[in-house]
Amino acid sequence: MTSPMPSRLYFDNAATSFPKPPGVFDAMARYAADLGATNGRGAYAEAMECGRLIRECRERLCRLFHGQSAEHVVFTLNTTDALNLAIKGVVGARLAARPRDEVHVITTAMDHNSVLRPLNALSTRGVRWTCIPADPDTGLVEPDDIRRAIEDRTALVAVNHASNVSGTIQPVAAIGRVCADKGVPFLVDAAQTLGHVPVDVQEADIDLLAFPGHKGLMGPLGTGGLYIRPGVERMLATCREGGTGSGSDKDTQPATLPDRYEAGSLNAMGIVGLGAAAGYILDHGMAMIADHERHLMGLFLDAVDASGLHKTLRMLGPPTPQGRVGVFSFVHPSMPSAEIAAALERDHGILVRGGVHCAPRAHGTFGTIKGGAVRFSLGPFISAEDIRRAVAALSDVCGVVKRISRARAKA
Ligand SMILES: Cc1ncc(COP(=O)(O)O)c(C=O)c1O
């Protein structure tokens, strides 16, 4: 059944979350209407209040992932910006310390282009990198494979926490132990986990945590951050220098965090919104939100099962809510994923993403690099009825394809 004017349902939370929790836009509007100033650039009340709100956001984020110091939460534009700072900063510091040595970095086949592309760009500057394969059914990486790949020259291990293609959660605590044993800095890309599942940087021995503000944390676009474990800054060169509002009598970058890595004016309005979003998550409790999302994943998987869709479509990654986040990608045997996504929007108002999802080696692992996959990604405000409607729509689109194929075969 197609509806002439379907109301629109957003299932693309892996790209950016929508809607945002209550209070986020109010906080941003209040900043824009009443403050408007930038932190650290003046001693008047509005600039001081902006500084307080930004500090509050750092503290809330630090509590969320159990960091040791809120000053070590550095704001960035997004996850990509944070990953570039982490990768290029570690490589830059290593090249500065041992200019004649080759630098080696390890990543995985499940990693996003925001890791793969910086590494490729660095290949021209003497950086060699190893990509650890993942299991083609589950998408899981074996921590022992990482242990075996570590060399004397390995400067960094960069691992995707949960895949934006299959939803697979990697065993980061086990990988963190391997890196701690070997004394190699461990960078985790938490783009698909922070705000969805508990993340504990101390428990998982994470040295650098790159995260978006605009996905699971439910802040606005243009926000993200890098958490730098105290002491790790000694291995992290700056990638950008400039004004910080501190130590302004000197023409050298301040050594103290966060200013060392935050050159230029911040996205204060976005960070104020992110602070409100982080407050919402802390108030509700990360464990409660994770439980709720696990419940939604169960509903989604049950609906797929009940509809019989699993007989037509191949779903990537773990088949149960365990060991995954709510990112569900499907492959049809004959219909390109981009066409399924277009039909879902056109005929049902369901907003999903089709194609290759910026992680070519993950698609290579699953054998889906050609047509990609159609991806539904959940958020905490999706209801049971929304899930029912989305799965029914997918069923309808696949049914239409089946009817057309049968008619073609008969003709
Ligand atoms: C696993 C993963 N890493 C990194 C990114 C890049 O995130 P951002 O858009 O915040 O730069 C994404 C975006 O979808 C992602 O899914």
Image (tube, rainbow, N blue to C red):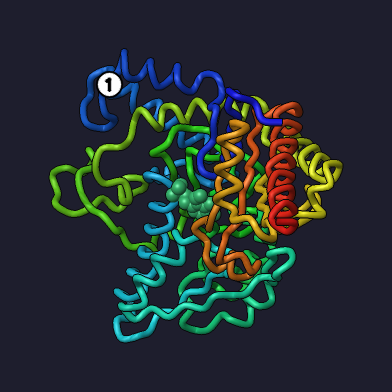
Query: Dot 1 lies on which element?
Result: loop
Q: Residues within 10 Å of mark 1 (few under 14, many from 20)?
A: some
- In the image, residue 356 above or below residue 325: below
Whether label 1 lies within 8 Å of ligand 1 gets the answer no
Residue at 41 percent across and 66 percent down: it is 117
User: Between residues 340 and 250, which one lies in front from this camera angle?
Assistant: 340
Residue at 65 percent across and 38 percent down: it is 378
Residue at 56 percent across and 80 percent down: it is 150
Q: Is residue 64 visible?
A: no
The image shows residue 51 at horizontal and vertical percentages of 34, 28
User: Between residues 261 and 82, which one lies in front from this camera angle?
Assistant: 82
Question: Quadrant location of residue 6?
Answer: top right
Asked whether, in this view, residue 199 is left or right of residue 297, the answer is: left
Residue situated furthest bottom in the rendering: 100
Asked whether, in this view, residue 326 is left or right of residue 186, the answer is: right
Question: Quadrant location of residue 125?
Answer: bottom left
Question: Quadrant location of residue 369?
Answer: bottom right
Give the amino acid at mark 1: Gly
User: Between residues 267 and 140, which one lies in front from this camera angle?
Assistant: 140
Residue at 83 percent across and 42 percent down: it is 307
- In the image, residue 160 above or below residue 367: above
Residue situated furthest right in the rendering: 306
The image shows residue 250 at horizontal and vertical percentages of 14, 49
Q: Which residue is mark 1?
A: 36
The image shows residue 155 at horizontal and vertical percentages of 46, 74
User: Between residues 158 and 347, which one lies in front from this camera angle?
Assistant: 347
- In the image, residue 121 above or below residue 395: below
